[in-house]
């Protein structure tokens, strides 16, 4: 473990083009989303700068932006800390996610052809393999890609934009329960694919609503140290 509690190999390389402050922001947000940086963890500018290979200035700017967006808390005379979401915050976010994704599933059932079904089946196979290998990071990433694909197949740009606003936090809340959800989550994904393939809009809506509600209730039932 590094001095800030980052697992070895978890710090992303800042190789993409663009302003340095934006790349540092994206790197820190990814570390928070994946819980390499845990809720409540103290964020020391100098240590983060060292891990990322940058000066303290872009780190400071990134932390200020993350504070504005609710990912980081800046405490007077104490410094920056990863935000610890309340149960109410998580519940509100995951409830909105259910509404958005249930509608996306309905639209996907109405619009999806054989190519889209094949894409979903491939993602499902990848997710099942990640669970079988106990690769939580891969399972979480593939879960996000699966839900993004359903949203894409829905064909509603406004719905997709709204979903994108909550996607990062959905991943944040899903990560600590991904192992517990495990194979059952992908069984539910298979049920969803079947409903979409059958063009059964009502069934697709019901399956997605139940699926996302399972994640919400599992999150609330998790051990409180997660």
Image: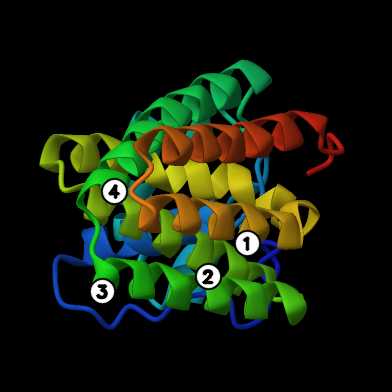
How far is disc 2 from disc 3 in space, using C-alphas? 14 Å
Q: Earlier in the sequence, mark 4 or mark 3?
A: 4
Q: Which residue is mark 4?
A: 108
Residue 88 in the figure: left or right of residue 113: right
Judged from the image, the secondary structure of the residue bearing numbered disc 4 is helix
How far is disc 1 from disc 3 in space, using C-alphas? 35 Å
Q: Quadrant of the N terminus?
A: bottom right
Q: Earlier in the sequence, mark 4 or mark 1?
A: 1
Q: Quadrant of the C terminus?
A: top right
Whether tag 2 and tag 4 are in contact, CB under 8 A, the answer is: no
Badge 3 crowding class, 10 Å Cα cut-off, few under 14, some 14 to 19, many 20 or more, is few
Instruction: Report the front residue among 134 and 18.
Output: 134
Judged from the image, the secondary structure of the residue bearing numbered disc 2 is helix
Q: Earlier in the sequence, mark 2 or mark 4?
A: 4
How far is disc 2 from disc 4 in space, using C-alphas? 16 Å
Of marks 2 and 4, the one in the foreground:
4
> What mark, if any, has residue 36 been given in the picture?
1
Of marks 4 and 1, the one in the foreground:
4
Q: Is any atom of residue 164 visible in this view?
A: yes
Q: Quarter of the image holding residue 6?
A: bottom right
Q: How many marks?
A: 4
Judged from the image, the secondary structure of the residue bearing numbered disc 3 is helix
How far is disc 4 from disc 3 in space, using C-alphas? 12 Å
Q: Which residue is mark 3?
A: 115
User: Who's the residue at 50% across and 68% down the image?
Assistant: 142
User: Who's the residue at 50% across and 66% down the image?
Assistant: 141
């Amino acid at each position: 473990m590094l001095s800030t509690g980052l697992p070895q190999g978890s710090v992303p390389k800042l190789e993409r083009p663009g302003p340095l402050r934006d790349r540092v922001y994206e790197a820190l947000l990814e570390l928070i989303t994946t819980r390499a940086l845990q809720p409540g963890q103290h964020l020391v500018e100098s240590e983060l700068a060292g891990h990322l290979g940058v000066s303290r200035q872009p780190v400071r700017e990134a932390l200020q932006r993350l504070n504005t967006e609710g990912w980081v808390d800046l405490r007077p005379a104490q410094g920056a800390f990863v935000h610890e979401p309340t149960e109410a915050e998580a519940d509100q976010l995951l409830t909105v996610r259910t509404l958005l994704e249930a509608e996306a599933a309905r639209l996907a059932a109405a619009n999806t052809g054989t190519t889209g079904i094949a894409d979903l089946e491939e993602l499902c196979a990848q997710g099942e393999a990640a669970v079988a290998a106990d690769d939580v990071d891969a399972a979480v990433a593939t879960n996000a890609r699966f839900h993004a694909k359903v949203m894409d197949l829905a064909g509603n740009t406004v719905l997709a934009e709204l979903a994108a606003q909550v996607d990062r936090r959905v991943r944040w809340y899903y990560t600590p329960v991904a192992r517990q959800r495990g194979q059952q989550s992908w069984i539910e994904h298979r049920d969803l694919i079947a409903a979409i393939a059958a063009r059964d809009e009502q069934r697709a809506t019901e399956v997605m609503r139940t699926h996302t509600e399972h994640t919400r209730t599992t999150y609330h039932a998790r051990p409180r140290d997660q």
